[in-house]
Image (spheres, rainbow, N blue to C red):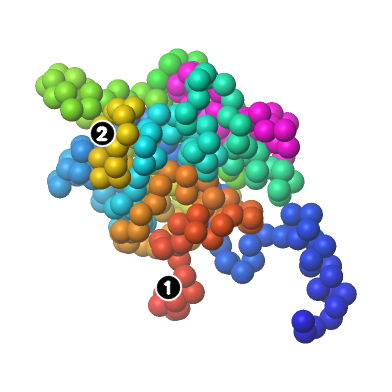
Amino acid sequence: MHGNPIVWWMIGAACAVSLCADVSANYKAKNVFIVIADQFRFDDSWGDKNRAYIPRISKELTPKGSRVETFYGNPSFMAQVHLTILTGSWNDVRRIDPKTHPTQPTLFEVYRKKLGKPKEATYFITSKREYYYLEHSEHEEYGAEYGPVFEVTKEEGNDQELMQRLRDRMKTHQPSLVVVLLGQMKSYNKKRNEKEMATYRQQMRAVDTMLADLWQVIQSSPPYKDATDLFFVNDHGDLITHEDCDDECKRYMVMFAIGPDIREDYVSTQKWRQNNIAPTALKILGVNGWKEADIMKDFLVTAADEKKKK
C-alpha cells in the first residue's frame, strides 16, 4: 500500500462504520425515486407498437433514459412482488400470512442505518391501504426504528391525491429516497371486455401523465434537478397465476429509468429481475455491500459515456 499510512487508516476506519459512499462509481444522483404502478401491464404500454396509451413516457422520457427489454419477476412465483422491489430479496414472497411485515430489511431501513439518514430523508406513499405491511421489516437489526415516513391516501386508489401529497412533501422536506406505489389501475389481464379495457387504458394514460409530470417537477426543483434518478416499474406481468412458470411467460414486465446516472436512449437486453432494483438504487446513493452481479450496471452511465459528451 502506498501513501500516508495514517490517511489510509482513517479511510478504513470510516468505511468500517459505514460512512464511506461509493466514490469510485462517481454517481451524480443524490436522490432516487422508485415509482411502482400496480397493475400497469406491458401489453398496452411498450407491448403496443404505437405506444398509444403512454404517449408522454414514450416520447418525452424514453429517449432520455433506459428501458429494460428483458425484465422478469420470480422464475416460479409472482405474488408479493412489491416486497421484492423494496427488499431486493425473494425470501418473503411465499408466506402463510401475506400481510405480515417482511423478514428482510427494506431499502429505507438499509439506507437510514448504513448512512445515518434521518426519517425525513425517506418517503413512502401509496394509494392502496392493503400495503401497510410494506412500511418496515421485522428484521432484528433494522425494523420500525429505521422505517420511512409512510403515508396512505385518504381515498383508496386516489393517485391524484397521492401525487399532490408527494409534491408537497418534496417542497417541505426534500426526501432523498422516495417510493411511490400507485394503486388506481385495475387490469383485466387477458379478458378483453370492451368497456373494462376502455377504463383500464384511460387509467394507463393517467399514469403516463403523472409520471411525465413528476419528472417535470423533479427537473424544476433545485434540490432534485439533475441530481435524481427515477425508476419506473410495474408489479407483475400480464399472466396472473400461482403456478410454476418459466421466464418467458413472465416476460411482460416494465422497467424504465431516467436521470443523470442513466444512459440515454438505451434498451437493455440483459436479464434483470425485480430484486435488482433495491441494490441498484442503494448503490447509486452510496450504500455498499451488495454483490456486483446484483447491480444493473449495463444502463448506468460509464466513464466512456461521459467522455463522449465532452
**In the foreground, 271 or 56:** 271
> Mark 1 and 2 residues: CB-CB less than 8 Å, in contact?
no
What residue do we see at 31% from left, 58% from top?
A: 269
Residue 271 seen from this side? yes
Instruction: Reply above or below: 98 against 64.
Output: above
Give SS at disc 2.
Answer: loop
Q: Residues within 10 Å of mark 1 (few under 14, many from 20)?
A: few
Marking on residue 34: none
Instruction: Judge left or right: residue 3 versus residue 197.
Output: right
**Residue beneath disc 2:** 238
Give SS at disc 1.
Answer: helix
Location of residue 145 in the rendering, given as x and y in whole percent from the top left corner: 73, 31
**Sequence order check, earlier mark of 1 and 2:** 2
Location of residue 70 in the rendering, given as x and y in whole percent from the top left corner: 31, 52
Residue, far right: 6
Location of residue 16 in the rendering, given as x and y in whole percent from the top left corner: 78, 58
Magenta stretch holds residue 281: no
Which of the 4 image quadrants contains residue 267? bottom left
Q: What segment carries the magenta color? A: 118-147
**Residue beneath disc 1:** 305
Magenta stretch holds residue 139: yes
What residue do we see at 71% from left, 48% from top?
A: 114
